[in-house]
């Protein structure tokens, strides 16, 4: 299981960087400054691109669900794998953006977490905190042989 968790974390990190690169390109093409909050950016997005972004978000969740389904044995393990991979993806998405464009400038920067079904808006520290706690809990469960 340790090898699975390591490889799934690596998958989540790679996926996060890939999505971070896409967001950097989108911001650049749409003329959104790197220092702007994503909350402000949503107002600048043409409706067509917002709908396209929603499909990208849906595809991301589908990919995470499929990998969890294929790798996990029991339904509980599939759920744990989904949460584990999601947490690494989410956490390293922000790290990737910070490395690429120094965004977010602060953990209190407001972000649009998801667009589906409507925009979820919160400071960056919130998803990073939830993802960090998720990783710690799953690692502890593994270390104590609960999963």
Image (cartoon, rainbow, N blue to C red):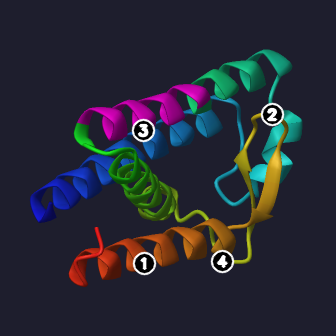
**Rendered location of residue 44, percent (x, y):** 84, 35
Counting residues from the start of the chain, the first of labels 2 and 4 encountered is 4
Q: Secondary structure at mark 2?
A: loop
- Is residue 59 part of the magenta span, yes or no? yes
- Labelled pair 1, 2 in contact (Cβ < 8 Å): no
Q: Looking at the rendering, which quadrant does residue 67 occupy?
A: top left
- Labelled pair 3, 2 in contact (Cβ < 8 Å): no
Q: Which residue is mark 1?
A: 137
> Is the magenta region chiefly helix, strand or loop?
helix
Q: Which residue is mark 3?
A: 64
Q: Quick one: label 2, few (<14), some, or many (20+) residues within 10 Å?
A: few
Q: Quick one: label 3, few (<14), some, or many (20+) residues within 10 Å?
A: many
Q: Which mark is residue 22?
A: none
Q: Which residue is mark 4?
A: 106
User: Label 1 vs label 3: CA separation?
Assistant: 19 Å
* Residue positioned most to the top: 48
Q: Which mark is residue 117?
A: 2
């Amino acid at each position: 299981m340790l090898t699975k968790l390591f490889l799934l974390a690596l998958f989540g990190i790679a996926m996060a960087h890939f999505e971070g690169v896409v967001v950097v390109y989108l911001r650049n093409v749409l003329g959104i400054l790197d220092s702007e909050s994503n909350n402000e950016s949503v107002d600048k997005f043409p409706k067509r691109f917002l709908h396209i972004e929603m499909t990208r978000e849906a595809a991301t969740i589908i990919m995470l669900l499929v990998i969890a389904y294929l790798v996990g044995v029991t339904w509980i393990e599939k759920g744990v794998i989904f949460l584990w991979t999601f947490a690494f993806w989410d956490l390293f998405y922000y790290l990737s953006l910070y490395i690429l464009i120094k965004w977010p400038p602060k953990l209190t920067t407001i972000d649009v977490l998801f667009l589906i079904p409507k925009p979820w808006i919160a400071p960056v520290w919130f998803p990073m905190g939830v993802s960090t706690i998720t990783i710690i809990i799953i690692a502890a469960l593994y270390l104590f042989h609960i999963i």
